[in-house]
Amino acid sequence: MRCGLRQRSNTPSRPGEEDEDTGDDSERWLAVHGEGSREGYRDMELFIASVEDPDRAERLVVANKGRGAFRRFKDELSRWPGELERWHAFSEERQRGRARSWLAAAGYSVLPVDHRDS
């Protein structure tokens, strides 16, 4: 799916939405590309390295291999609610960091986290 960011209003747009800002005007649009699964795998590897219990870490390493790794990883984490909660916070922060980097690379000043709307 192709998505974009309206640069004047900083609002997202999806295909098929009627808008006065339609078109490929690069001065008015910032293309949003999917990041794929590579970054997600890397996040899981970094998280596993932070798990203090060696048995849990090993179970997560095994879950993180091959096809279906994301589902197995989350299923394994669900056995330990504290670790699952920690994973969600870790993953969200990594995704936000990538988004902040992407926006900065596109020339935008990114507000600190405490300025965002909740």
Image: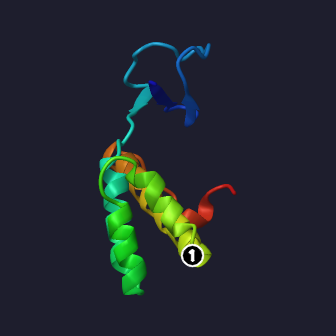
Residue at 39 percent of width and 37 percent of height: 34
Q: Secondary structure at mark 1?
A: loop
Mark 1: few, some, or many residues within 10 Å (few <14, many ≥20)?
Answer: few
Q: Quadrant of residue 63?
A: bottom left
Q: Is 100 in front, or is 55?
A: 55
State the colouring used for the structure image. rainbow
In the image, residue 52 sits, relative to residue 41, either above or below, namely: below
Residue underneath mark 1: 80
Split into 4 quadrants, where in the image is the C terminus? Answer: bottom right
Residue at 59 percent of width and 70 percent of height: 85
In the image, residue 22 sits, relative to residue 12, either above or below, namely: above
Instruction: Give how far across and how far down residue 9 sits, in percent.
Output: 58, 33
Q: Is 25 in front, or is 5?
A: 5
Seen in the image, is 82 located left or right of residue 41? Answer: right
Seen in the image, is 41 located left or right of residue 95? Answer: left
Query: Do we see residue 77 in this rendering?
Result: yes
Seen in the image, is 30 located left or right of residue 42? Answer: right
Instruction: Give how far across and how far down residue 43 sits, in percent.
Output: 37, 62
Residue at 49 percent of width and 32 percent of height: 5
Three-letter code for the amino acid on which mark 1 is drawn: Trp
Residue at 47 percent of width and 28 percent of height: 3
Query: Do we see residue 92 in this rendering?
Result: no
Q: Quadrant of residue 27?
A: top left
Q: Quadrant of residue 19?
A: top right
Q: How many marks?
A: 1
Instruction: Give how far across and how far down residue 76 sits, in percent.
Output: 49, 66
